[in-house]
Image (cartoon, rainbow, N blue to C red):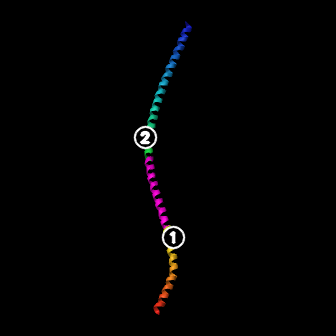
Amino acid sequence: MAGSDVTIEILKEIREAVRATNSRLEGTNGRLDSLEGTFNRRFDVMGERLEVVTDRLTVVTDRLDVMSDRLDLVETTLLDVVRESRSTSRYLRILGRQQADIEPRLSALESRVDKLESK
């Protein structure tokens, strides 16, 4: 019987060790559940913040699109102004040359008219 008493004592010690282990595991599970809740709350907050950032980025993107359209219009307008300016400049140069060509002819004509009038 002495062997069975030792066996019973060993089994009791094993049972106590298992109970202690189960108790520690329950504590660990409680801490893990608490951490899971904390992480879930933090992830929810991060998700909300990301939604706000995404909304703001959408607004910024829309504004940039409008600004890009406006800049395209400004660019087109400036190119038109430059073309018109070149055209006007060419026209003025041509007029200047024509005036330079006409000036001596006009002077010659005036002197001829003066000679005719003096006769």
Q: State the CA–CA distance, disc 2 to disc 1.
A: 63 Å
The residue beneath circle 2 is 48
Q: Is residue 83 magenta?
A: yes
Q: Which residue is more in the foreground, 106 or 23?
A: 106
Q: Residue visible at 51% across and 16% down? A: 15
Check residue 90 in the rendering and tell me which mark sits there, or answer none: 1
Where's residue 86, x and y in %? Answer: 50, 67
Please determine whether, in this image, residue 7 is positioned above or below residue 108: above
Question: Most prominent secondary structure in the magenta stretch?
Answer: helix
Residue type, mark 2 in image: Glu
Q: Residue visible at 51% across and 14% down? A: 12
Bounds of the magenta span?
57-85
Check residue 3 in the rendering and tell me which mark sits there, or answer none: none
Where's residue 26, x and y in %? Answer: 47, 24
Picture quarter with the N terminus: top right
Q: Residues within 10 Å of mark 2 (few under 14, many from 20)?
A: few
Of callouts 2 and 1, which one flags the residue occurring earlier in the amino acid sequence? 2
Please determine whether, in this image, residue 26 is positioned above or below residue 111: above
Could you tell me which secondary element the residue under label 2 belongs to? helix
Q: Residue visible at 53% across and 14% down? A: 11
Q: Residue visible at 51% across and 76% down? A: 98
Residue type, mark 1 in image: Arg
Q: Quadrant of residue 10?
A: top right
Front: mark 2 or 1: 1
Where's residue 104, x and y in %? Answer: 52, 82
Tag count in the figure?
Answer: 2
Q: Which residue is more in the foreground, 70 or 48?
A: 70
Q: Are marks 2 and 1 in contact (CB under 8 Å)?
A: no
Please determine whether, in this image, residue 75 is positioned above or below residue 8: below
**Which residue is outermost to the right?**
3
